[in-house]
Amino acid sequence: MPDEKTDELLTLEEVARYLKVSTWTIHRFIRQNRLPGYRLGHQWRFRKRLVDEWLERKSTDRSNSAEG
């Protein structure tokens, strides 16, 4: 079972700060279905664990594409 810290919910602004990108970039990732998140009313929420997994996959994707 994931601990509370890794399973916490982040807002769009918190994800942007966490990834060190603009909120516009996060909006673009959402529109392109590149970043896992969901809407609660008019606001976006992201599970930190899923953002971390997404980030890890992106890192792995880059490593694999550099080799091949």
Image: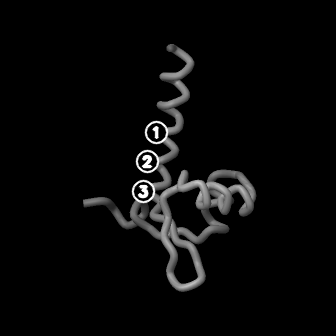
Tell me the tag on residue 10: none
Q: CA distance from mark 1 to mark 2?
A: 6 Å
Contact? badges 3 and 1 (CB < 8 Å)? no
Contact? badges 1 and 2 (CB < 8 Å)? yes
Element assignment for label 1 = helix
Element assignment for label 2 = helix
Q: CA distance from mark 3 to mark 1?
A: 12 Å
Q: Characterize the local packing of mark 1: few (<14), some (14-19) or many (20 or more) Cα atoms within 10 angstroms.
A: few
Q: Circle 3 sits on which residue?
A: 49
Q: Is residue 31 above or below residue 11?
A: above
**Tag 2: amino acid:** Glu
Look at 54% across and 68% down and name the residue there. 10
Look at 51% across and 76% down and name the residue there. 39
Look at 47% across and 40% down and name the residue there. 56
Query: From the viewer's perspective, is 64 left or right of 43?
Result: left
Query: x, y (%) of residue 46?
Result: 50, 66
Look at 65% across and 59% down and name the residue there. 26
**Tag 1: amino acid:** Arg
Q: Circle 1 sits on which residue?
A: 57
Task: Tell me the quadrant of the picture where the N terminus can be found.
Answer: bottom left
Query: x, y (%) of residue 41?
Result: 53, 85
**Tag 3: amino acid:** Arg
Contact? badges 3 and 2 (CB < 8 Å)? yes
Q: Is residue 41 above or below residue 67?
A: below
Tell me the tag on residue 53: 2
Element assignment for label 3 = helix
Query: x, y (%) of residue 21?
Result: 72, 53
Give the image's coloring scheme: one colour
Q: Is residue 42 above or below residue 32?
A: below
Query: From the viewer's perspective, is 50 left or right of 34?
Result: left
Q: Characterize the local packing of mark 3: few (<14), some (14-19) or many (20 or more) Cα atoms within 10 angstroms.
A: some
